[in-house]
Image (spheres, rainbow, N blue to C red):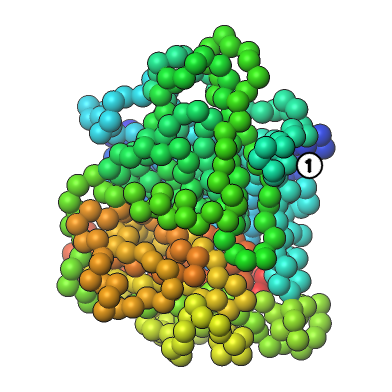
Amino acid sequence: QETHHHEFSVQEQSIMRLCKSHTIITVNGQFPGPTLEVRNGDAVIVKVTNKARYNVTIHWHGLRQMQNPWADGPEYVTQCPIMPGGSYTYKFIIQDQEGTLWWHAHSRWLRATVYGALVIRPKLGSSYPFPKPKLELPIVLGEWWIRDIISVQRQALFSGAAPNISDALTINGQPVIFTDALNKIKNISPNAGTVKYSVTSGDTVLLRVINAALNQQLFFTVANHRLTVVATDAVYTKPFTTTVIMVGPGQTTDVLLTADQRPGRYYMAARAYASARNAPFDNTTTTAILEYKSTTSRPILPPLPAYNDTNTVTAFTNQIKSPGKVDVPKNLDENLFFVVGFGFFNCSPGPRCQGPNNTRFAASMNNVSFVLPSSVSLLQAYTNKIPNVYTPDFPATPPVKFDYTGNVPRGLWQPVKGTKLYKLKFGSSVQIVLQDTSIFSTEDHPVHLHGYHFYVVGQGFGNFNPSQDTARFNLVDPPQRNTIDIPVGGWAAIRFIADNPGVWLMHCHIDTHLAWGFGMAFIVENGVGPSQTLLPPPADLPRSKWREAWRGG
Ligand code: C2O
């Protein structure tokens, strides 16, 4: 076991993109931020110093952080933010996880530019369950905004129904805009910083694809090459071959690519999968170049699915399976049904109420639009029994039942604001069915649960039908993930054992939706004995009651 020490300085940095200079928040002046490379079983110590003018926290997306939510990072959930001038040292151990994860700011929308890859290799002496690749490349997909991200966030919160979209998609921080129409592609920023990856003919390369975008689900493909999926969300999968993958915000997909084509140059490309009807989205395509050594030909462009190609997404998703039989919880202690989606608050006209007919756009789970506390974290409130911060009464089922994906009148589903948590006993076996709704619009939502990996036992379209759909669940070899796509106008069912005590956020990883209230948190109570109880909080945990003048909500 090795211990890795890192220093993260969160600081402003001026960088050139799309021929203009921008001041963005970075870690150590790098964009994307540093890649952490560790092995399963290693310890990681990262001292984060905040030299920027905003509060910040760092989240290690997908790491289980067993008994150690203190290092998880979402602001006001497991810690107060690190204030400007302050610092906090995240200390954690990688326990039984291998593959690709990533880290990102979990404070307002700072993760737009504050993110990086987290590569977890097998322990010394053990190996991948596939032939060792010659080369490993983190491919971090993201978005680029010309405007300042905090003003973009403000507009998304208060300006009614029109969400903001990014100005370009990025591969490893480089926005290379192509126009949308695939056969009339026009490169408007020729060679400007396009990332090139050099490979040798015949070599097999492991691409660790991470979707770090705030708001965009993404298709990814490489011209002329086949991709063999070997892991998702740092869990190995049964290998399968495809030409295109879809990665939701928060998710990772590891693919093997063999350089077995005619030596030359090939584009890898990403573009949006945008499932919501009539909602604007970033309609650009971004590329990087896969270049066989000493070739200079004109790069070949790959075809990409249409932005609304749900069939391709479904076909891809259905192929993701665990490598063999897994131990899925069968006797359920908790059978939860969470109805998610959009809605409208009634409010009095004003700058913070610009939705249709004196409403403000909202999102919710079981009709609760999630509000974070603002002076203390939920984890502190729970462990120190601080009253009036949250209520442990998040509903196990929706307050009203209706045809969720039918023609729903807006008035039927008016979200109420709340900081409601759901308590789970240590060791309980939990099923959650997440159901999309059609209020305003159906949409594919990537839902992330902190502190856990769960089995994805079923997914489908329309309303979940317990008797029929449960009978079709995959209880043999379902994949394990930390972020699951609820299919557009459909449902997803997950199962896990509540074996990690703490307070754990569950939310849509599309930041616009989280900002609108699409989130909740679980309290997982302590079990008995030292391996089932929370570790004590670190002495430097930010606990400040200092509050910024402006916060969302
Ligand atoms: Cu990747 Cu709550 O986050």
Q: Which one is nearer the viewer's eye here, 494 or 99?
A: 494
Task: Examine the image and state in which quarter residue 429 appears.
Answer: bottom left
Residue 185 vs residue 118: left or right? right
Q: Taking 493 as reference, is 168 above or below it?
A: above
Q: Position of residue 508 (x, y in %)?
A: 51, 64
Closest to the observer, 135 or 98 = 135
Viewer can see residue 447: no
Q: Nearer the viewer, residue 216 or 36?
A: 216
Please give the name of the residue rendered at 19% of the width and 57% of the height, measured from the top-left corner.
476
Q: Quadrant of the N terminus?
A: top left
- Left or right, residue 480 beside residue 310: left
Q: Nearer the viewer, residue 80 or 142?
A: 142
Residue 481 placement: quadrant? bottom left
Q: Position of residue 63 (x, y in %)?
A: 38, 50
Q: Residue at x 58, y 20 (%)?
A: 265
In this rendering, the count of numbered labels is 1
Q: Is residue 354 above or below residue 453?
A: below
Residue picked out by circle 1:
22
Q: Position of residue 457 (x, y in %)?
A: 29, 62
Amino acid type indicated by mark 1: His
Does 458 sit left or right of 191 as displayed? left
Percent position of residue 518, x then y? 54, 71
| Secondary element at tag 1 | strand
- For label 1, the crowd category at 10 Å Cα-Cα, with few meaning under 14, some 14 to 19 and many 20 or more, is some
Q: Quadrant of residue 459?
A: bottom left
Q: In the displayed structure, does residue 41 sit left or right of residue 539?
A: left
User: Is there any visible trace of residue 459 in the rendered image?
Assistant: yes
